[in-house]
Image (tube, helix red, strand yellow):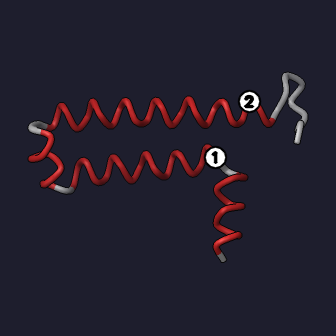
């Protein structure tokens, strides 16, 4: 089962990062302790934005490395 999960994560980098981002947004919005620790809702939103940008950039690089300019799979 562990190998199946690893393969799923490796084969779908964009979906995995989107799911992590969605989970981060949910935690930031619905867990009051997070807002208290951060100091304000604006700080939580800013951190969420930065993390989502990093995850998106990382996913786009993985996809770009897998698919060439011609759209064919290079792996």
Q: Earlier in the sequence, mark 2 or mark 1?
A: 1
Q: Is residue 26 left or right of residue 35?
A: right
Quadrant holding the N terminus: bottom right
Q: Quadrant of residue 6?
A: bottom right
Q: Position of residue 26 (x, y in %)?
A: 31, 52
Residue drawn at (88%, 42%), measured in percent from left and top?
75
In this rendering, the answer to whether 7 lies above or below 37 is below
Q: Is residue 7 left or right of residue 52?
A: right
The residue at the point 64 percent across, 56 percent down is 9
The residue labelled by disc 2 is 64
Q: Position of residue 25 (x, y in %)?
A: 33, 46
Specify the farthest residue to the bottom: 1
Badge 2: residue crowd in 10 Å (few <14, some 14–19, many ≥20): some
Q: Position of residue 36 (x, y in %)?
A: 9, 47
What residue is at 15 percent from the left and 40 percent from the top?
38
Which residue in the structure is indicated by mark 1?
13
**On the rendered structure, is 51 left or right of 44?**
right
Q: Is 71 or 3 nearer to us in this picture?
A: 3
CA gap between label 2 and label 1 equals 11 Å
Q: Is residue 71 above or below residue 13?
A: above
- Quadrant of residue 39 in the image? top left
Marks 2 and 1 in Cβ contact (< 8 Å): no
Q: What is the secondary structure assignment of the residue under circle 2?
A: helix
Binning the other alpha carbons within 10 Å of mark 1 as few (below 14), some (14 to 19) or many (20 upward) gives some
Q: Is residue 58 left or right of residue 44?
A: right
Mark seen at residue 59: none
At x 46%, y 50%, the residue is 20
Q: Secondary structure at mark 1?
A: helix
Q: Is residue 17 above or below residue 1?
A: above
How far from the left and from the top, in percent, is residue 49? 35, 31
């Amino acid at each position: 089962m562990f190998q199946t999960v690893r393969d799923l994560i490796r084969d779908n980098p964009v979906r995995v990062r989107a799911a992590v981002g969605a989970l981060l947004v949910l935690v930031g919005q619905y867990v009051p302790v997070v807002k208290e620790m951060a100091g304000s809702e604006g700080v939580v939103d800013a951190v969420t934005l930065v993390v989502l940008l990093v995850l998106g950039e990382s996913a786009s690089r993985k996809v770009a490395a897998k698919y060439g300019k011609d759209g064919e799979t290079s792996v």
